[in-house]
């Protein structure tokens, strides 16, 4: 910045360097940077004696972040004249001229006045740093505006896009520029301006005057550089009609119905307290948010932002008839550090805190608007430019400061509530520590009811504590002192994901009541130690949710990932993946291939040549098909089946060596494993359908399974029960619980699987003897046969095909399989239980025709019956044909009369091998849950049966505590100066507060960081020097100029609470019990608010006496209790407002 | 995550095209909602969105729609599509994945079926590939507005030996309405999407290299005179991504990957949100219920119910067996709903107070609150029953032991509410005891004078009630604080019955909280008497009657609570290790 023009314009390195060497020179921001660093260090150096635990630290190390690397560009795009740079901070040089006399005229002073939070405010910090900065009022530093940097055209292109958009509202863009690493955030606004008063023309004109830069557009000597006010009557208004502008106190009802928070106003109140709406308000906020931002039903623009860029003074009415197509883009560019770590840090911060960045950007925008408008009043070109540039630089400096502050502010290391929630080990110590501080404050600083007033205010406005005391109806899972996490919210997050960061931000600001209020708290005081204590204690009452970061992995062991899938394609992908992995190691982006291998659907090739069931194929072929597509299923709508097929694929990797893709029969080492290949996959798929993914995992490794279960649940409503049965029966070779995000299975299932495992082991040890005769019989069979069998069973539709004449099976598309489906279902419902049972018998008999003859006799009868039913359903189904078909592949079954039945039997055979007792009563073992889910599946399946189903891979979730969230970043410690975003912080003096607060509050309402309209912005100011607690709000102007807001009424509920906690503590009741009691008392307040809301249902006026007599609610409690009530009974606000 | 992920392609012939698009379908209502979690909002949401939602849902899955995506979907006409602009073969129904646990479905088609979404995706696609400018042309951009949704886009090239410049241009876009959410997810999405892109590019590179090896295009092209139509003519200008990557399963793979991406992004951050502890009443009710269940397990009368979610069960059972929850009493009080039965019953405490008269009621209530035995003698079982149901609302659930109607006297330790038939003899020591109160219900003579005026009390007017106790309460005694407050609430006709109910809830909880402290103090920690006295005054309960009341109410503490306190005393660290 102090460097020459040449340096700054071109290479970024040069830029950086010049910025770096600035220190001694002019650059304001550079100075701040240094200064803040110092303060930070100081803070670390002198921790308060008793406040060690409140020690402050930075969540974000920002040493790598250079303020000067925030660049501002303003661009305009006019239909007629194309694009012009209106400002580029990189092109601005500051000239140290003590006597900038010319600029010392009216507009400057005016600017100082009309831009609160602007010059003087931030200046104070600058000057205090002892720099060579000048007060704006006295000497406006003279800036020289040079040629914009060379990249500016490119950046303009990025801001506006290469094609003009017709959209009138504002658009938001974020670009990442790789080299040099930069992050650009830009907003494009439609301009609203005077029709003939050439607005920015003057500016353009002026720049050219200075620059003589032809690139900046054609010189436009606008005559009318005077009096935009005069021009006002003709001001054009390009705001689209559907975007009503609004006054600052309006309810912005364009958005009201859509706003998650405000719409709570419209919602019928919750029923009686008996309904278990424990965390209802939190829950509801989140639910509504997920609904209002839903894409499922098409989009509903939630609110029409009337964000235009105003080039006309607000006092001027605009003339909509004169619309000129002009857009203004404002862009902020953050140069990122080349160091990965620092870069990542800042990016993390930027993206997680984006709402705050955006809010400040909006501020910057309004400052620019104002500068543009007011500079037009200046007739003389050079002055005008000087003024304009000065103002913009000032605004930019504010922006830089704010961002810097936000990034680097000292934070409370151990917010009490969050720590209690998350830390497991030190809870008692934590309680003791907190209670010690808490009671100390009650005792020492409650003179004048100061502390009670502060707590009253905090409880009244930061309402997120309310859901944490609403009693629930379910039993506590754990100990008493511990509240449980809200299950309903957890479930909601799973089924209807919303943005937890957003939810947390709302909680912190207390924006959960209705109407929505956004609250911050500032503790002012010279005694740093005391202020820090207060801040620390308040972090118990300023509550929010704790965030967890979950890394979801789809393959448990990606080291195995290499063998994923069939064929070389996958392997290549993986190779590539590994290469990439090494590339990304630093970023730690992935630990697994990003392309999730599908659990295969039908590939096109396979679709094209469907294999008839009985056709004699090479084992390889069959095998392949087993894994992949069912010929006849292809294109047909059978999600379940394809999913089965898919799941096979999927599990392969997990199976490790147990399965080799495509035609690797001969290669498989263990015959045991070879045999079951198809089956195992099928079985697992069945599990997928019927139950959770987890189960799936377990069964993967188990090769014995047959598809019965699979088929059952997915096909027929009536059949789900057996699946459990089978599960139980089927031995598991290896139980690997993959704990994913899925709901844990019934506990008894685990034990069952253990049992299974044992059985399996038994079987495994000597497969021949341990297993049933049928198993033996199976052994001799050749693989192909096995395969065939399994394949047949694999697919119901297929099976039917088999019964039918060939043509059908080869027909292979939707119609046919659909039919099959229908038939199937019919049959199934008829024969549920019986059939299931029979299958076992049949299986046995089929599998071991020789040994199981006796059994077979009877079972066959039944089987036949069933079979006939099926046949009837089919109405065609020439048995002989089918048998023939099957015969080709499978000798032993030849004597089974009925095609379908025996076919099934075949399949089942394998499953039954280990356990031959076909009469297993487990059939009757109805697992409701399984049933239910199976039925659900069927339901879903039928509904959505059009698409081919591909199962999702099972998941494994690794959770870590997320510290980069608002709960950790917006609860700050003792800061050198007042700051606008923080939910909580302390500061030494209220000087800046006085200057900025009103504007900040207004800004907060206008540009709510919550991305939805809010009704009011509130700031609680506790002054430990004056022992006063005041509440400032965006809604009321304070009459008394000595005050920032209104004094707080001390709630007697709160003071009695404080007193009793103190007394109990003095009676040496243990800290955690005191805290339990504290929570109980907070719960009492909640209950009283319930009563109050009930009372208000029938009354429009509160007769305080009535409440007082009965419940001890006094008038000073009313603000608190109504605020609490507004979180659960929105109508309260309506009544009282 | 409420988003759409799509793969877009800039076709040399047709410009920007959406190739493949994965949407998320959620269950219309959250799963928790069924358990009474938020009936209000549930309904509300249904009203507000339900219509649209259902219809669109059905639409999306209606056979006509899905089966013939080609014909009815708003997508481009067949003629406008070349191999390069197509993903799934014509007539391919698309893919679907179910996430069982969350009831979320991920559906993939070439285009969304929903017309509005179609245009949103289309717009995002066009913007991503031909409007927005990304330095280097490959890389991430975020853009969007409220009207068209917000988009995270990552553009990239895929090698194609036959394409102009040997590469084709694609983008993967993520569209959301929740702008903040999308921006928050940028680092995550960038990592994942780039991973997908890298793998796609890797596959394509292999193919490209193989093709170059077989037939070096560059050399060939260098030798051929440039003809502008060459690429369009040779038919290879439009190669599908499947062939460029030589992966027949590419679309299935992308479906799974996109679905996975959506799932992973949606569950990337989760919050832990605490809710309040259950009230003592709730706890006790649950304990009682658990006992009942244990008992009834052998009869196994509600197997099915047990499979249900606990809260449902609880609510159901509460209604059946543990009547005095506020909902019930409000039912009772709703005159209208009870009118038809015309049973002579008490509807509320206020009603009872009117019927008995203030002094009698006060005496009765006093005894109830202090845990003395309350005996009702009447021929009318329903009446007695209703009296108990009403009276018990003054006490914590744990303090209520009712024998609704007995043919013999039962000792006080067995019950504090006892209903007796008129003939049963009450032992004389009970009659004279100050710890018992007896309400005798006689059929009234015509001249009965109880102060009821309302017509709905007619059923009760045939009775007259005599309340007696061994030692009548002195009229000037202040009595327990809670009694006075209850009386005040009952007296004040401005307070609706619902308010009174809430009021009772508050009062009970308030006093139970005192009980808890006292219990901790005396029973757990066994602190000396002086301390206890101090404590009582802190609690505002040092008067004799209040102390008595607290002592009685202590018996109503839940086992859960008591054992928790006891255990933490025994092993102070016990509670720490949990979480």
Image (tube, grey):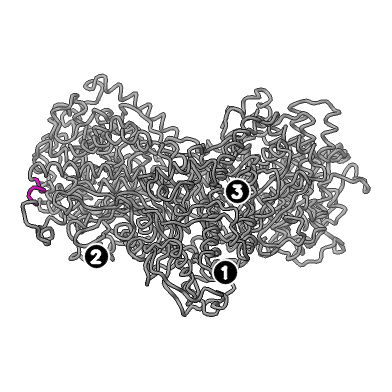
User: The residue marked by circle 3 belongs to what chain?
Assistant: A
Q: Which span is picked out in magenta?
A: B216-221
User: Quadrant of the rendered structure where residue A190 is?
Assistant: bottom left
Q: Which secondary structure class fits the magenta region best? A: helix
A903 relative to B456, above or below: above
Q: Are marks 3 and 2 in contact (CB under 8 Å)?
A: no
Which numbered circle lies on residue A133?
3
A103 or A529, nearer to the observer = A103
Q: Is residue A913 left or right of residue A416?
A: left
Viewer-side label of 1, 3: 3
Residue A902 locus on image (x, y percent)? 18, 41
- Please name the residue shown 12% across and 61% down the image: B228
The quadrant the C terminus of chain B occupies is top right
Mark 1 highlights which residue? Answer: A246
A613 or A569, nearer to the observer = A569
Mark 2 highlights which residue? Answer: B76
Residue A711 locus on image (x, y percent)? 28, 44
The residue tagged with tag 2: helix, strand or loop? Answer: loop
Marks 1/3: CA distance?
39 Å
Whether labels 1 and 3 share one chain? yes
């Amino acid at each position: 910045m102090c460097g020459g023009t040449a340096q700054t314009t071109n290479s970024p390195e040069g830029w950086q360097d010049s910025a770096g060497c600035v220190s001694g020179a002019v650059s304001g921001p550079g100075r701040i940077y240094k200064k803040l660093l110092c303060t930070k260090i100081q803070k670390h150096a002198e921790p308060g004696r008793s406040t060690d635990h409140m020690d402050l630290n930075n969540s974000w190390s920002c040493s790598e972040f250079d303020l000067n690397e925030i660049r501002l560009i303003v661009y305009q795009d006019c239909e007629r004249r194309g694009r012009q740079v209106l400002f580029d901070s990189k092109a601005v040089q500051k000239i140290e001229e003590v006597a900038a006399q010319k600029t010392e005229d009216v507009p400057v002073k005016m600017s100082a006045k009309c831009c609160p939070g602007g010059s003087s405010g931030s200046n104070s910090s600058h000057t205090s740093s002892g720099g060579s900065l000048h007060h704006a009022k006295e000497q406006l530093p003279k800036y020289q505006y040079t040629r914009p940097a060379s990249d500016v055209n490119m950046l303009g292109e990025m801001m506006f896009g290469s094609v003009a958009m017709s959209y009138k509202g504002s658009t938001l863009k974020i670009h990442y520029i790789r080299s040099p690493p930069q992050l650009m955030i830009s907003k494009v606004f439609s301009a609203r301006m005077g029709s003939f008063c050439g607005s920015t023309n003057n500016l353009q004109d002026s720049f050219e005057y200075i620059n003589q830069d032809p690139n900046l557009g054609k010189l436009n000597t606008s005559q009318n550089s005077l009096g935009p006010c005069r021009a006002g009557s003709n001001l054009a208004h390009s705001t689209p009609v559907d975007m009503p502008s609004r006054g600052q106190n309006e309810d912005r009802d364009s958005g009201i119905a859509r706003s998650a928070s405000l719409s709570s106003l419209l919602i019928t109140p919750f029923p009686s307290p008996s309904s278990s709406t424990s965390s209802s308000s939190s829950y509801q906020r989140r639910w509504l948010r997920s609904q209002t931002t839903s894409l499922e039903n098409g989009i509903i623009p939630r609110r029409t932002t009337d964000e235009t860029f105003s080039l006309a003074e607000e006092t001027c009415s605009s003339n909509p008839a004169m619309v000129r197509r002009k857009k203004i883009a404002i862009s902020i560019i953050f140069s990122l550090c080349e160091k990965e770590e620092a870069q990542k840090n800042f990016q993390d911060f930027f993206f997680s805190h984006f709402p705050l960045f955006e809010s400040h950007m909006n501020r910057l925008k309004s400052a620019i608007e104002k500068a543009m408008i007011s500079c037009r009043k200046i007739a003389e070109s050079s002055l005008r430019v000087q003024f304009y540039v000065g103002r913009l630089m000032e605004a930019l400096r504010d922006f830089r400061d704010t961002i810097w502050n936000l990034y680097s502010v000292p934070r409370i290391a151990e917010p009490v509530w969050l720590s209690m929630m998350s830390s497991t080990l030190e809870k008692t110590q934590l309680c003791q520590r907190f209670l010690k501080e808490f009671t100390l404050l009650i005792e020492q600083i409650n003179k004048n009811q100061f502390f009670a007033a502060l707590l009253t205010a905090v409880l009244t406005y930061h309402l997120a504590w309310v859901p944490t005391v609403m009693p629930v109806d379910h039993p506590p899972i754990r100990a008493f002192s511990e509240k449980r996490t809200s299950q309903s919210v957890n479930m909601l997050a799973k089924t209807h994901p919303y943005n937890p960061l957003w939810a947390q931000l709302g909680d912190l600001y207390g924006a959960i009541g209705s109407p929505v209020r956004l609250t911050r708290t500032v503790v002012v005081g010279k005694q740093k130690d005391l202020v820090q204590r207060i801040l620390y204690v308040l972090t118990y009452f300023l509550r929010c949710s704790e965030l967890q970061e979950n890394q979801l992995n789809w393959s448990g062991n990606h080291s195995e990932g290499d063998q994923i899938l069939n064929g070389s394609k996958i392997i290549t992908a993986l190779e590539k993946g590994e290469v990439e992995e090494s590339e990304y190691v630093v970023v730690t982006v992935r630990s697994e291939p990003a392309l999730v291998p599908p659990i295969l659907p039908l590939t096109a090739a396979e679709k094209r040549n469907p294999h008839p069931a009985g056709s004699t194929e090479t084992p390889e072929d069959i095998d392949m098909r087993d894994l992949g597509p069912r010929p006849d299923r292809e294109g047909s709508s059978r999600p379940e089946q394809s999913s089965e097929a898919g799941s096979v694929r999927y599990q392969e990797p997990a199976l490790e060596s147990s399965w080799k893709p495509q035609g690797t029969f001969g290669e498989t080492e263990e015959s045991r494993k070879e045999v079951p290949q198809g089956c195992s996959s099928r079985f697992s798929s069945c599990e997928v359908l019927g139950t959770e993914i987890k189960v799936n995992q377990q069964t993967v490794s188990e090769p014995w399974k047959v598809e019965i279960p699979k088929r059952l649940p997915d096909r027929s409503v009536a059949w789900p029960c057996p699946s459990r049965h089978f599960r139980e029966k089927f031995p598991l070779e290896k139980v690997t619980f993959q704990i994913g995000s899925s709901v844990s299975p019934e506990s008894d299932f685990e034990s069952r699987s253990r049992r299974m495992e044992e059985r399996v082991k038994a079987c495994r040890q000597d497969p021949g003897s341990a297993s049933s005769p049928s198993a033996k019989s199976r052994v001799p069979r050749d693989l192909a046969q096995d395969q065939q069998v399994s394949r047949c069973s694999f697919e119901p539709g297929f099976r039917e095909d088999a019964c039918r004449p060939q043509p059908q099976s080869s027909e292979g598309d939707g119609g046919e399989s659909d039919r099959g489906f229908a038939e199937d279902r019919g049959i199934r419902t008829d024969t549920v239980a019986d059939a299931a049972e029979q299958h076992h018998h049949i299986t046995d008999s089929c599998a071991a025709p020789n040994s199981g003859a006796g059994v077979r006799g009877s079972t066959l009868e039944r089987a036949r019956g069933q079979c006939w039913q099926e046949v009837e359903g089919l109405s065609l189904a020439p048995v002989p044909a089918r048998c023939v078909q099957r015969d080709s592949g499978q000798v032993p079954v030849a004597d089974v009369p009925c095609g379908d039945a025996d076919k099934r039997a075949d399949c089942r055979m394998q499953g039954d091998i280990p356990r031959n007792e076909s009469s297993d009563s487990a059939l009757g073992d109805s697992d409701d849950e399984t049933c239910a889910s199976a039925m659900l599946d069927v339901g879903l399946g039928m509904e959505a049966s059009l698409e081919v189903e591909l199962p999702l891979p099972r998941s494994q979730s690794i959770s870590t505590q997320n510290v980069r969230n608002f709960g950790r970043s917006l609860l700050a410690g003792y800061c050198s100066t007042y700051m606008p975003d923080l939910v909580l912080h302390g500061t030494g003096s209220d000087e800046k507060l006085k200057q900025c607060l009103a504007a900040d509050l207004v800004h907060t309402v206008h540009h709510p960081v919550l991305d939805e309209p809010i009704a009011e912005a509130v700031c609680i100011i506790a002054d430990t020097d004056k022992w006063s607690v005041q509440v400032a709000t965006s809604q009321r102007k304070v009459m008394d100029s000595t005050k920032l807001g209104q004094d707080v009424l001390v709630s007697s509920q709160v003071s009695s609470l404080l007193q009793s906690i103190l007394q109990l503590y003095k009676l040496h009741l243990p800290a955690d019990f005191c805290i339990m009691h504290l929570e109980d008392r907070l719960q009492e307040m909640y209950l009283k608010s319930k009563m109050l809301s009930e009372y208000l249902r029938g009354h429009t006026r509160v007769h305080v006496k009535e409440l007082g007599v009965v419940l001890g609610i006094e008038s000073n409690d009313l603000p608190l209790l109504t605020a609490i009530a507004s979180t659960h009974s929105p109508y309260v606000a309506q009544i009282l407002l | 995550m409420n988003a759409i992920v799509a793969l877009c392609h800039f076709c040399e012939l047709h410009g920007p095209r959406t190739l493949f698009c994965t949407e998320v379908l959620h269950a219309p209502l959250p799963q928790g909602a069924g358990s009474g979690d938020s009936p209000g909002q549930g309904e509300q949401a249904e009203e507000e969105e339900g219509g649209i939602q259902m219809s669109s849902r059905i639409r999306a899955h209606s056979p006509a729609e899905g089966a013939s995506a080609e014909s009815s979907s708003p997508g481009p006409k067949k003629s406008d599509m070349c191999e390069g602009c197509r993903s799934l073969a014509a007539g391919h129904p698309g893919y679907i994945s179910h996430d069982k646990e969350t009831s979320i479905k991920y559906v993939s088609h070439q285009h969304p079926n929903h017309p509005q979404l179609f245009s949103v995706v289309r717009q995002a696609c066009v913007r991503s590939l031909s409007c927005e400018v990304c330095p280097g042309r490959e890389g991430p951009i975020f853009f969007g507005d409220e009207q068209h949704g917000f988009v995270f886009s990552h553009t990239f090239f895929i090698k194609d030996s036959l394409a102009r410049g040997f590469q084709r241009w694609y983008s993967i876009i993520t569209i959301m309405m929740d702008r903040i959410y999308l921006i928050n997810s940028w680092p995550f999405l960038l990592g994942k999407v780039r991973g997908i892109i890298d793998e796609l590019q890797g596959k394509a590179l292999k193919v490209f290299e193989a093709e170059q090896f077989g037939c070096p295009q560059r050399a060939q092209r260098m030798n051929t005179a440039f003809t502008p139509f060459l690429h369009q003519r040779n038919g290879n200008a439009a190669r599908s991504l499947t062939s460029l990557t030589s992966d027949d399963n590419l679309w299935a793979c992308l479906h799974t990957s996109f679905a996975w991406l959506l799932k992973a992004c949606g569950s990337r951050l989760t919050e832990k949100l605490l809710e309040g502890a259950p009230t003592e009443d709730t706890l006790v009710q649950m304990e009682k219920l658990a006992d009942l269940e244990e008992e009834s397990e052998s009869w196994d009368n509600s197997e099915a119910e047990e499979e249900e979610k606990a809260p449902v069960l609880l609510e159901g059972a509460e209604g059946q067996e543990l009547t005095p929850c506020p909902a019930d009493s409000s039912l009772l009080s709703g005159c209208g709903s009870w009118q038809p039965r015309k049973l002579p019953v008490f509807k509320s405490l206020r009603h009872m107070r009117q019927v008995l008269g203030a002094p009698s009621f006060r005496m009765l209530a006093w005894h109830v609150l202090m845990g003395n035995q309350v005996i009702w003698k009447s021929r009318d079982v329903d009446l007695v029953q209703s009296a108990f149901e009403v009276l018990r609302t003054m006490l914590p659930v744990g303090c209520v032991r009712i024998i609704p109607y007995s043919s013999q006297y039962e000792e006080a330790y067995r019950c504090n509410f006892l209903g007796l038939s008129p003939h049963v003899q009450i032992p004389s020591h009970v009659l004279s005891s100050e710890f018992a109160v007896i309400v005798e219900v006689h059929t009234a003579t015509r001249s009965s004078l109880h102060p009821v005026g309302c017509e709905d009390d007619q059923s009760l007017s045939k009775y007259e009630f005599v309340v007696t106790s061994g030692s009548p309460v002195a009229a000037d005694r202040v009595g327990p604080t809670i009694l006075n407050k209850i009386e005040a609430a009952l007296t004040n006709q401005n307070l609706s019955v619902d308010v009174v109910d809430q009021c009772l809830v508050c009062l009970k909880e308030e006093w139970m909280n005192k009980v808890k402290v006292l219990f901790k103090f005396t029973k757990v920690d066994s602190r000396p008497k002086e301390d206890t006295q101090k404590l009582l005054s802190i609690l505002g309960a040092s008067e004799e009657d209040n102390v008595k009341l607290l002592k009685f109410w202590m018996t109503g503490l839940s086992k859960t609570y008591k054992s928790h306190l006891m255990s933490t005393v025994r092993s102070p660290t016990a509670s720490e290790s949990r979480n």
